[in-house]
Image (cartoon, helix red, strand yellow):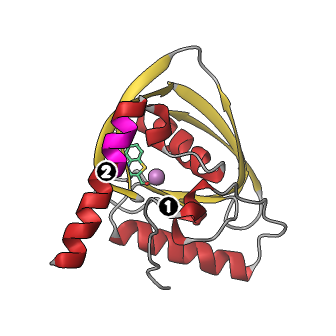
Amino acid sequence: MTIREIITIPDPRLKQVSTPVETVDDDLRALMDDMVETMYAAPGIGLAAIQVGVAKRVIVMDLALEGDTPEPLYLVNPVIVPTSEEHAFYQEGCLSIPEVYEEVERSAECRISYLDYNGDEQVLDCTGLLATCAQHEMDHLEGILFIDHLSRLKRSMAIKKVAKLKRAAENA
Ligand code: GNR
Ligand code: NI
């Protein structure tokens, strides 16, 4: 397993629409293993393949608390449907948009159908932070970032903040 580099804005790859996976094979499992290791190292609670530069419809998530037994979820070709009319606000962050945290409104509950690590069909009902995270990750597969849900002003402030951080890192 390898920790891969997480790409950050304004890398144009983050705007790509990811393509469906044809078969869940050992090559794909190697990618998913790397993604989980990369997510834990970051640390983060979710990661989409495009964040490591691979435009495939693959997501990993783990909402287990630090210190508890890890509970990684591997989602291939996920399809999401809202299962509640209710919406919820959560303060979101993204490993591809470092140090930006803003409230985003999403469906409070959703159901995801997907293929798991072994290529078997699964259905997962999500509430709370898991529902938020799942919708955030699904957006990545469509080339959408959480800042795209913000006002133009907040979005441009976020983009400038990341650019400034990168300049500071380069000059350090
Ligand atoms: O680690 C992450 N935390 C998080 C918090 C609130 C809503 C969404 C997320 S996902 C994020 C990791 C990430 O960038 N996934 O794409
Ligand atoms: Ni993200």
N-term-proximal mark, 2 vs 1: 1
Q: Amino acid at mark 2?
A: Lys
User: Above or below — where is 38 with respect to 162?
Assistant: below
Please, what is the dominant secondary structure of the magenta stretch? helix
Residue for point 84% across, 67% down: 22
Q: Which residue is mark 2?
A: 160
Q: Nearer the viewer, residue 74 or 71?
A: 74
Residue drawn at point x = 59 percent, y = 58 percent: 59
Image side of residue 139 versus residue 123, left or right? left
Identify the residue at the far left of this view: 172
Amino acid tagged 1: Pro
Q: Nearer the viewer, residue 111 or 46?
A: 46
Q: Is residue 65 placed above or below 41 in the rendered structure? A: above
- How far across and down, in percent of the image, does residue 125 sit? 60, 35
* Pointer 2 local density, CA inside 10 Å: few below 14, some 14–19, many at least 20: few
The x and y percentages for residue 111 are 65, 34
Q: Residue at x 50, y 38 (%)?
A: 148
* Res 16 seen here: yes
SS at mark 1 in the image: loop
For mark 2, give the secondary structure: helix
Residue projecting furthest to the top: 85
Q: Which residue is mark 1?
A: 72
Q: Nearer the viewer, residue 79 or 12?
A: 12
Residue 28 is left or right of residue 6, and the answer is right
Q: Is residue 112 magenta?
A: no
Residue 95 quadrant: bottom left
Query: Is 89 left, or right, of 126 in this rendering?
Result: left
Q: Give the quadrant of residue 163.
A: bottom left
117 and 148: which one is in front?
148
Question: Which residues make up the magenta segment?
Answer: 154-159
User: Which quadrant does the C terminus fall into?
Assistant: bottom left
User: Where does the image place residue 171, in percent across and percent down from the top left?
Assistant: 18, 77
